[in-house]
Amino acid sequence: MKSYWVGYEEPNSMYCVCFLQIFTRILRSLNLPVGSSQVLVPRYLTNAYDVGHIVIWISSMLGGPSKQTQQQLSGLFNSITSFFHPSNNGRWLMKLMKLLQRLPASVVRRLHRERYKKPTWLTPVPKSHQLTEQDITAFVESMKQPVLLAMFSKTGSLEAAQALQNLALMRPELVIPPVLEKTYPAMETLTEPHQLTATLSCMIGVARSLVSGGRRFPEGPTHMLPLLMRALPGVDPNDFSKCMITFQFIATFSTLVPLVDCSSALHERNDLSEVERELCSASAEFEDFVLQFMDRCFALIESSTLEQTREETETEKMTHLESLVELGLSSTFSTVLTQCSKDIFKVALEKVFNFATTNIFETRVAGRMVADMCRAAAKCHPVESLKLFVPHCCNAINQLTVSDDVLREEELDKELLWSLQLLSEITRVDGDKLLPYRPQLVPILRRTLHLKCKQGYSLSCNLLHHLLRSTALIYPTEYCSVPGGFDKPLSAYLPIKDWGRPGDLWNLSIQWHTPSAEETAFVFYILDTLLQPELLRLQGHAEGQLEMSRDDILQSLSIVQHCLLGAGSLLPALDGQPVPNLVPSMVSLEETKLYTGVDYDTSRENYREAICRVMRKLLHHILEHSEDDTKSLFSIIKIIGDLLHFKGSHKHEFDSRWKSFNLVKKSMENRLHGRKQHIRALLIDRVMLQHELRKLTVEGCEYRSVHQNLLRDLLRLSTSTYSQVRSKAQSVLFTALGTYNFCCRDLIPRVLEFLWPEQQHVTQQQFKGALYCLLGNHNGVCLANLHDWDCIVQTWPALVSSGLSSAMSLEKPSIVRLFDDLADKIHRQYETIGLDFSVADSTLAIAAQIVQTPLPLSSVPLPSAQDVETGRERQRARNQDALQKYEKLVHTLLECLAQRNLPWKFEHICIGFLSLLLRDDHPLPPPAVRFFVQSLNHDALIVRKMAISAVAGVMKQLKRPHKKVELNPYEISGCEEPGELMAGDRKDNRWLQYDGKNLLKTQEAWEACRFVEKTHWGYYSWPRKLLLYAPVQEQPPLGRSRDEMNEMEQIIFDHFSDPKFVDQLIKFLSLEDRKGKDKFNPRRFCLFKGLFRNYDDAFLPVLRPHMERLVADSHESTQRCVAEIIAGLIRGCKHWSFAKVEQLWGLLCPLIRKALSNITVETYSDWGTCIATACESRDPRKLHWLFEMLMESPLNGEGGSFVDACRLYVLQGGLAQQEWRVPELLHRLLCYLEPKLTQVYKNVRERIGSVLTYIFMIDVNLPCTRPAASPRIGHFMQRVMRQLKPLMEADEEIQNHVVEENGVGEQDERTQAIKLLKTVLKWLMASAGRSFSTAVPEQLQLLPLLFKIAPVENDDSYDELKRDAKTCLSLMSQGLLYPEQIPLVLSMLKEIAGSSSWHARYTVLTYLQTMVFYNLFTLLSHAAAVQDVRWLVIGLLEDEQLEVREMAATTLSGFLQCNFLSMDSPMQAHFEKLCKTRLPKKRKRDPGSAVDTIPPADLVKRHAGVLGLSACILSSPYDVPAWMPQLLMDLSAHLNDTQPIEMTVKKTLSNFRRTHHDNWQEHKQQFTDDQLLVLTDLLVSPCYYA
């Protein structure tokens, strides 16, 4: 990429060609639907570009002296702009939208790097190639139109909004005005809410650029207030999406702008610019805006009350939509008030206070919304707000709770509930501002915390929580966009200068609330007063001294929980003795404590520990006496979770805030200037999130006795009776397991106690709970699969043995599913655990150097030599221990399998675990090998499948290493090493190729030959070190006796030498698994390959009779079985001696011949896979027996056309694997096939077509590549064209001759040519998209013939020849053309356009449509070609055939639309001249004369002119260019002409009306009044009754 290249040169003509090719390929890769006949090529090779890569290419090439890239980019967008219109939709749209979204972002990134980024190690972009102002303007101009169209796309406006955001950073004056032009009308209309949501979404993207103004767009800020005022009706309770986008819009603009009335500055200051004066006078409306916004919010709230939105029977909770509206309302109102001046705030505060206190709201929906608004007001200016709200709420609550009867009421007065809710929300403010209200608030807490009504005491608990939280936490107290607020005299500070201003990261001046001594004392006073009594009551109840009802317990627990949540940040973490002996270590495993700004007061009581003590006692009491009190258990579980982890914020709350922070940041960031130029509120939010992140960092905590006790309690709850209790406890337990170091080792034995069969008293609930504990949650710790030998040695056998537990029941689907999930998770997540943990001496030396370096100085001293030696000893001991544990686990699992009454499911799970223990660094113990080999003949299919994979793996473990030696390929070939890289067939790689004259038929030749198995070696270049297998004498010996084998090899040898065992195995392998879905199985192939590789031909005598029997049986499963064995044999005989290999092929050749003669529809793909697998990565010279046998007349007709096609398919599979190494075989095959290309049978023709594709695959013309020795397309086509001559010369229509009998009598040349053509068409279709390049010159020779045959209509009833010809033309038209090929193609098309067949002339046009679009940039660079195409199309507009004329008009319209041709005055003049052609008067026809079918030439000319005008009009379906009104007037003059002119005019006007209807109000501005009058008469249908 240019921005990363050093010394990028000025593009010369070669570079220009590259630009054209790059943009042509980009356009092709978008896969857009083009032309009348859309047959898309399967693009495995041609067009799989990722949008991300396209974007980097384009943005990196922009600029530079030549401006070539921008020119092509403008061309690209001009050609595809209409695809972005909202009426167009398809799979391609997602790719287009991605391009639109990412390209501006990439250019902004580059511009940032060039102009604003600090210099880094990246190569700087040379000055000459940096983007200039002119480059940026041209880029933005080229993207503007597509982005504006994409605003209303069916996929949503998100991509367009992001594109506009980045474009506005570069050129706001070009981008924002057109968006405003669309936004203002959208705000006025009521009928199209989707337009409003789309435009507001885009306005949010450009908000910052608009409000900032700047030198490029100084008038931008003046739009801010009109936009805000017009957005207010969007706060609509009846339209959720409109309401939410309006809230986002108002919040975005309010965040950027101080809402301060600056109108008085007009009189006070005389240094204001014109725009500033305008803004100052407009700012007087801010107060109106805030008050109107509040009125809208109040209306929204009043329509959201429970009474209005629910039936009585429905739930009283908020719905999801209501909670989103509540969030939008509260955050927007909070933002508006934060940005208000003090004067506006006071008016707003009074208004919200009056609304809240003169109404009584239900507390579920409307009450929450109003309370949120009041909280927002209180947070902005606590002193003024609390002065109003606290006395009012306290008085109301005191009056309503005067009587003690209230305490016992189950349904409380609505006013009391509302007052409590309001008070609980307005106390979420700066803590020190609450202290003066202590005397009013504490008595209310005392009075209301013990209300009997749950709703009442819950609200009181919220008040308690918020009061404690406000005084105990550290948090910022203001989020204003300017430090210090706006309340300064206008003479000294003018707020309008700060519109859109970013915060200064190094001078944020955050106002923090940190708990003062007085606040801390107040917190502990509340805890002493309100928490201590509850703890004493609960302790008394737990010890049996005090009776409490369940409701009372729940109420006390609620108070405890809210106290912990409120004051948690001031309470030190739980402490205690570390749990000993979990893991041996020579280094300290103590936790690193993070300082979070709190100095804990150890002189006060640690309520965290006090709560912990009481909760444990209470928990044990409830579990023993009233386990069905689930509500209390839920509460205790929450409290335990908070005791362990809570230090002031919860993870889930933090995650949602982090997510919303990132969304806001993305929508408002300035990527151009970078350097964290975010608005101040965002920067403060980020600092706060960082502070919270420190509080949430709990990983790596030390595991202490107090944690141990709590985790055991959680485990007890996780295995208790009730499922919901278990689920909640498990969730807390999983979080804890990921927090404390090595706690899993302590807990696993306790979990497994519930699974061992010896435990007779375990209930099903405990059993299930234990399984869930082992399974873990989706992203946490999985106890069953810890990466630790100590753990899985316990868990895996316990899981298997649990099948014998009395609590286990396979009749319960939930338990069966749990075991399935456990086994699945272990198989997916298990990673092989190491056996050797040795650290190399070199590593130790480097570590010692690091410790001794002075910068940075290590806090850890250098270990002594004795320490290092001790460490080494421990390491050796650990390695030994790991090996013992591995073997112990294998033996334990085998013992489990030996238990007679183990259910089948657990047997399968156990075998699965065993198969996971196969390793590449240590052999499987012999008992396990024996088990797996015996399991090959197990009754259960699933076990046999696992055993096949396992035994294949064991074979790999037992594979003997073969010696390799380094060789020089140039010495072998006798050539000198070339000085430059040259790919393809060369003298130095010819020795690798198959040579039919020198087949290896003797042992001497075989042993002298150097085999190279890798197909890719030698074609492009040789490996730096060519390592080939040493001679046979230096390799491991073949034909070993049993005594020479190790124990594991003997086990396999004994079983496979046993005829009964093999007989049973083959029976199983030749059984059908899933009817119709079985395929050649690579695992079985690997099994046989391993057998023959490790034991050479030892088992061949036992297997031979089975193979002969299976080959003779034509059943699908038996054929598949023998195909797998044969593939395994061929690949497994890699290192056999010549004598054995020759003997093997003596056996295999007859077998394969027989198999191919018995081949069926079900088995042909298996045999193809078998031969392809056998030939993969094998030197073809080794396989000469196979290739020679397959080449023996594959099309001999024996067995009919199907067997012929199958034999070719199998041969193709083998040859395709060899690629470039078998040119001789490819030549022989082509010579064999050429006389047989005139096949009658379709299936054989299709197969020959596919084979031809592979024969010519290597015939590619690439730079630095020598011509291939394999067959050439050019030579082949010359021979084919000679045979097709009878068809080329004939004028009559070519029909599909079908002769069912092949070769019966001599047929005439013409019939033979038709059959040949059919096969050639199959080849052309097969090669499209599969071959590496398109052979254009060769294919061109066929074009006239294809145009003659291809039908005009899309009709499936046409015969095969015509359908194939049409498909071929469509595929060829999409081919990639190189500049030198264009004149050839066009001259051919011109020649065909002069043909006497109107079908051919018509098809030329459809061909042109696709060809031009798919090669647009290449053609545009060729001025002569553009003119040729232009006159070709305009010439065909005057064709005598009506259909050709109409298709020419469609083609012309498409070319104009994609900007291939331009609508210039010569073209317009030409059409207008044709339109004026006078028509001869109608003559009275003699009744007896024949009807004249050819229209008079004058009518054709006149019609051509009308069609030309029509094409120009229809080429602009979504806009009205300056030339269009006049053309429409010209066209309307022909409305009463004779047919077909009248019909053309009507169709054009109808299409114009349809495509321009949506934006007609905008389009009609282009017409004069007279033109509009004429047009209205034309477009409006006459009234029926007129």
Image: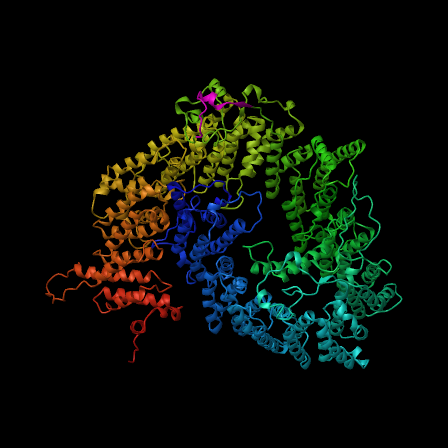
Q: Quadrant of the C terminus?
A: bottom left
Residues 284 and 295: in front is: 284
Residues 858 and 735: in front is: 858
* Left or right of residue 513: residue 242: left
* Left or right of residue 1233: residue 1181: right
> Which residue lies most toward the right here?
545
Image mark count: 0
Instruction: Please identify the quarter of the rendering in which residue 956 is found.
Output: top right
Whole-percent x, y for residue 1072 in the image: 52, 43
Residue 151, compared with residue 841, is above or below; it is: below
Q: Is residue 980 magenta?
A: yes
Q: Is residue 1155 visible?
A: yes
Magenta region:
965-981
Whole-percent x, y for residue 855 in the image: 72, 40
Residue 1090, compared with residue 766, is above or below; it is: above
Q: Is residue 1436 magenta?
A: no
